[in-house]
Structures are given as structure tokens and as C-alpha cells.
Image (cartoon, rainbow, N blue to C red):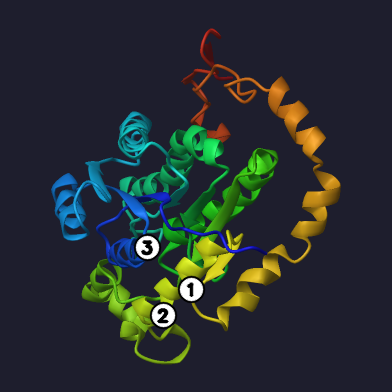
Amino acid sequence: MRRYDLTGRTVVITGSTGGLGSAVAQALRRRGVHLALLDLDGTAAAAQADALGGSRVAWAAQADVTDLDSVRLAIDRAATHFGRIDVVIANAGVSTVAPMATLNPDAFERVVDVNLTGVWRTFKAALPHVERQRGYLLATSSMAAFVHSPLQAPYTASKAGVWAMCNSIRLEVRHLGVGVGTLHPTFLKTPIMDAIHADPAGRCLWGGNERGLWRMCTVDKAVRSIVSGIERRAQTITTHRAHAIVAAAPGFFRPFVDRVGFTTRTITEASAASSPSGGLPHTSSTVSCEPEEQEGKTVRLAEGEPARRAP
């Protein structure tokens, strides 16, 4: 496959000031890329842009991937500033280490909202711009999409979700000439891993990632794999050669199914026939009581449906 020349292209990175985001931004800048650096910490992103050459080649904005309007505004401004967007790297992410029995539900929802839904919001906001350039969308997943560790249910679920979601979106946009890939790094020396190691549960679970199956991979090695993957517009990028087999195994039959089971004609016709609601009914309430707890209680069935007394 012909190499996707990055020189002069514009790349958007969310979570740009994190360890991996910063390292990738530096490597891409050395390739002659124009960078739109988006981060929840707008001040840190602005300092990052200055260090990478200033607004002519590195532009920064505050963006919250849990807010579609925030992401859309930042990406639209980046497109106006540079005149184009070719590649988007949805890289913002968070993690927790705790068992289901004790984890705060808000923490679970936060991880999924940032790691999974945040990717969806970023891609949705960016697609009109990337489509014009027949560009490339890359989401940071993890090897946790395939190897599911205990005490990290929201993280593994969100990263597996990113992988599956991108496989679906790839089919939706292939007729537009847009590529979609997922990045599956392993343990890297980054602030997110520092936080895990600083947590007693994380230190106990991973042993500091000093040896064996869970040993740390260098950021430099990971970045080389990532940049190479972008230049290939790869569907799957791993940061360690030994992990490629693990990442490939779950999707072994997917290329056949994608070609035979979902033709471009079927996808475009189904897309044209769809509605913005995706077919969901306009109701949100559900029965919340277990059957044995319903006796003598009022049960609300759905919006617009009268309440009734449970038998």
C-alpha cells in the first residue's frame, strides 16, 4: 500500500498533553505535520503548542470530549485556522482500579463517557472535515480491548467498545474514502500509568509493570509504531510486535464478513433510510422494581403511559 505522506497535513489530537499524546505530537511535528492540540486543560495545550512552534504550525484549544458542542467547536475552529483536517487521533482517556463491589457508579460512567463515547463525539464532530480530505480517523483503544484484567471493568469495557465501534464506523465511511483505525498500546511510562502505580490497588495488580507479561514498553518504541501505522492508514496498530497476533485473532474472520455480509450498496441505502434517533423510541423511563418488590407500589411504565398499581 502506498505510504500516506503526512507532510503538510493537519492532524487533530485530543488528550494532547498526556504522555502518549505529547510524544505523538512531537513525532508528527518532526514529519512536517500541522497540529491541532485539544485538551481539557487548555492552558497546558497552549503551552504545548508554543513549544512545538507556535500557532502557524501548532494550534491549541480547550475541549471536553464529554461535551459534543465543545469538541465540535474546537475542531471547527481548527479547520478554519489551518484550512483543512486530514487526520484525527481520539486519544483522551482515563482509568480506574477497583472491583465492581466497591467502585463508585459515577467513576464507572466517567470512564465510559470519556474513553468510549468521547471517541464517538470526536469522530462525529470531525467527519465532515476529514471526509473532504478522504482522511483517516484513529482512536486510542488498548490491548485491554483483548486482554481483560480484573479491577478495571469500565476501562476494559470502554476499550473493547472503541475497537468494536471503530470496526462498525469503518464500514459506514469506507465509500467516502475515509480510513478508520484503532491503536492498542500496552503499558507505557505515561502519567496515566504513574497514577495507577501510585494507587495501592494498581501497584498490587500490576506489580509496577517491571517484568513478565506486564512489563513496560518504551514510549519511543510505541510512537514509532503509531506514526508508521498512521502512514499506512492501518486498521489496527499495536506497539509491540508480539501483541499483533493477540490483536488480530478476534477479527480473523472480519475482513470476509465485511466484504460479503455488508456491501457498500447495502450500507449506503440503509444509511439513507435511517433516522437521527436510530430507531429508538422517544421514551426513557423503565420499570425499576424487581417483581417481588412491586406489590402495593405504583409502577411507572414509560413516558406518556399512565401509572398503575402493581398487583
Which residue: 46% across, 49% down? 87
Res 149 seen here: no
Front residue (pair 264, 208):
264
Label placed on residue 221:
2
Q: Is mark 2 on a helix, strand or loop?
A: helix
Q: Residues within 10 Å of mark 2 (few under 14, many from 20)?
A: few
Q: Is mark 3 on a helix, strand or loop?
A: helix
Which residue matches tag 1?
Answer: 225
Label located before the other in sequence (2 or 3): 3
Marks 2 and 3 sit apart, C-alpha to C-alpha, by 14 Å
Q: What element carries label 1?
A: helix
Marks 3 and 1 sit apart, C-alpha to C-alpha, by 12 Å
- The amino acid type of the residue labelled 2 equals Lys
Whether tag 2 and tag 3 are in contact, CB under 8 A, the answer is: no
User: Is residue 27 depicted above or below 269 in this figure?
Assistant: below
* x and y, in percent, of residue 55 in the image: 21, 46
Q: Residues within 10 Å of mark 3 (few under 14, many from 20)?
A: many
**Quadrant of the drawing holding the C terminus:** top right
